Image (cartoon, rainbow, N blue to C red):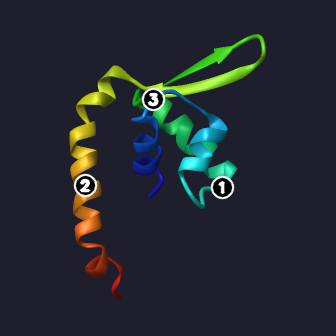
Amino acid sequence: KWKMPILTALSKGCCRYREIQRNVPKITTRVLSKELKHLEENKLIKRKVYDAPLSVEYRLSKYTYSLLPILEQMVVWGKNHKKVISEK
């Protein structure tokens, strides 16, 4: 549910934790932390820690850029079929 919006947010460039959180509406801090760890473990994102002042930036790995066209098409498909998807 959350990985695709996170990757989409990071596709615009490096982001700090709060920037990602602002760009992914309704995600909790706990869930965002967990999802970022999973994405890093699976080598889809890179995490860089700066010492002074202490800050962390996330960015897509080189490996993930090959996935972006597929993600973009999934977003387009979702928007085009939103009405059908949201019906229950």
The residue drawn where x is 65% and y is 17% is 49
Name which residue type carries label 2. Met
Q: Which residue is mark 3?
A: 13
Judged left or right of residue 18, residue 3 is left
Q: Secondary structure at mark 2?
A: helix
Q: Which mark is residue 4?
A: none
Q: Residue furthest right?
A: 53
Find the residue positioned furthest to the bottom.
Answer: 88
- In the picture of the structure, the residue carrying the numbered disc 1 is 28
**Amino acid residing under circle 1:** Thr
Q: Earlier in the sequence, mark 1 or mark 2?
A: 1
Foreground residue among 79 and 87:
79
Identify which residue is drawn at 36% across, 80% down.
86
Q: Quadrant of the N terminus?
A: bottom left
Residue at 26% x, 36% y is 67
Dot 3 falls on a residue whose secondary structure is loop
Give the residue at mark 2: 74
